[in-house]
């Protein structure tokens, strides 16, 4: 069975109230959602909190997911909106800073200069541009998929990705920027 | 261009969480089941409150009729209530099963 076919079956079962099917959806998509949030917000502990909230919200709204729709894109859309809400409530971010510092591996020990530069450059991008880069350059979303997930116009996504890519490559000292 | 994109992708790959993370999945499902439990509890409490209020409202009209038939049907009603309660307890909440993955 194709991954999309398996997703469709699990979604249908979850829509009938099966928590076991939803648990399998969580297992299948936790990596994509958490990776997107880590790249979109840069704070791993906050990203995992938001990912958990994303799945909780998804369970509440599973009935709204159309048959055949991409589960991954739908979940990333929910997580993006959670991320924007978290950005608006800055206090929440500050409250978690201490935990983030504790849980995250020490940067100097595990990250190369390039990784640090990439992270710093990502942090400078506006939230919507960063989300577009995280989906299209890091997670292989098509521009159309990202536009649907983030509820942004296709042209906006394309220009965000192009500008974000150029900025990241410029910071990394790539002549291709 | 392709090389630059591959380079970016390789750098982004460091953010990738593990493909399977039982601890994360368990935490999510614990939260989901807790929410389900609270919702069911709220529903049952609401239904019980509505039932109690209805009974309280109609009791003056109902009381004479209940008194009249209580002696005759009390054993039957008690047995039925016990049987229905036992069946519900043994069956537990009904949920759709997850489809088998091939």
Image (cartoon, rainbow, N blue to C red):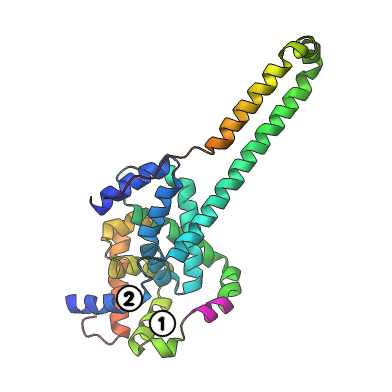
Q: Nearer the viewer, residue A171 or A95?
A: A95
- Residues marked 1 and 2, same chain: no
Secondary structure found at label 1? helix
Along the horizontal axis of the image, is B10 left or right of A113? Answer: left
Q: Nearer the viewer, mark 1 or mark 2?
A: 2
Q: Which residue is mark 2?
A: B12
Q: Which residue is mark 1?
A: A120
Q: Magenta segment, principal secondary structure? A: helix
Residue A137 image-quadrant placement:
bottom left
Residue A99 covered by magenta stretch: yes
Q: Residues within 10 Å of mark 2 (few under 14, many from 20)?
A: many
User: Which of the numbered marks, if any, corresponds to residue A107?
Assistant: none
User: Residue B67's x, y, as percent?
Assistant: 80, 13
Q: Is residue A131 left or right of residue A92?
A: left
Above/below status of A100 relative to A75: below
CA–CA distance in space, label 1 to label 2: 13 Å
Residue situated in front as seen by the camera: B90 or B92: B90
Residue depicted at 81% across the width and 16% down the height: B60
Residue B10 among magenta residues: no
Q: Position of residue B52 (x, y in %)?
A: 74, 28
Pinpoint residue A7: horizontal percent, then vertical percent. Answer: 32, 50
Which residue shows up at 78% across the image and 24% down it?
A: B56
Horizontal arrangement in the rendering, residue B55 relative to residue A154 (left or right): right
Identify the secondary structure beneath mark 2. helix
Q: Chain of mark 1?
A: A
Whether residue A46 sits left or right of residue A34 in the image: it is: right
Q: Residues within 10 Å of mark 1 (few under 14, many from 20)?
A: some
For the N terminus of chain B, the quadrant is: bottom left
Count of numbered badges drawn on the protein? 2
Q: Which residues are magenta?
A: A98-104
- Residue A69 shows in this picture: no
């Amino acid at each position: 069975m194709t991954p999309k076919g398996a997703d469709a079956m699990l979604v249908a079962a979850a829509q009938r109230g099966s928590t076991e099917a939803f648990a399998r959806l969580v297992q299948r998509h936790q990596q994509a959602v958490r990776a997107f949030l880590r790249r979109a917000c840069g704070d791993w502990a906050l990203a995992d909190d938001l990912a958990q909230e994303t799945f909780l919200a998804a369970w509440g709204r599973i009935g709204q997911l159309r048959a055949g729709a991409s589960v991954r894109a739908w979940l990333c859309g929910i997580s993006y909106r959670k991320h924007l809400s978290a950005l608006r409530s800055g206090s929440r971010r500050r409250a978690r800073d201490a935990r983030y510092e504790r849980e995250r591996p020490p940067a100097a020990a595990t990250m190369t200069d390039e990784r640090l530069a990439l992270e710093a450059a990502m942090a400078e991008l506006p939230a919507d541009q960063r989300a577009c880069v995280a989906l299209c350059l890091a997670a292989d979303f098509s521009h159309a998929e990202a536009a649907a997930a983030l509820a942004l116009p296709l042209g906006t996504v394309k220009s965000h990705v192009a500008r974000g890519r150029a900025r990241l490559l410029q910071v990394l000292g790539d002549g291709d920027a | 261009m392709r090389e630059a994109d591959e380079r970016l992708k390789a750098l982004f790959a460091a953010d990738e969480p593990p493909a399977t993370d039982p601890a994360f999945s368990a935490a999510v499902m614990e939260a989901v089941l807790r929410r389900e439990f609270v919702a069911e509890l709220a529903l049952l409490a609401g239904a019980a409150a509505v039932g109690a209020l209805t009974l309280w409202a109609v009791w003056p009209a109902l009381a004479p009729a209940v008194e009249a038939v209580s002696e005759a049907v009390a054993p039957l009603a008690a047995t039925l209530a016990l049987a229905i309660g036992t069946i519900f307890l043994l069956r537990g909440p009904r949920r759709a099963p997850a489809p088998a993955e091939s």
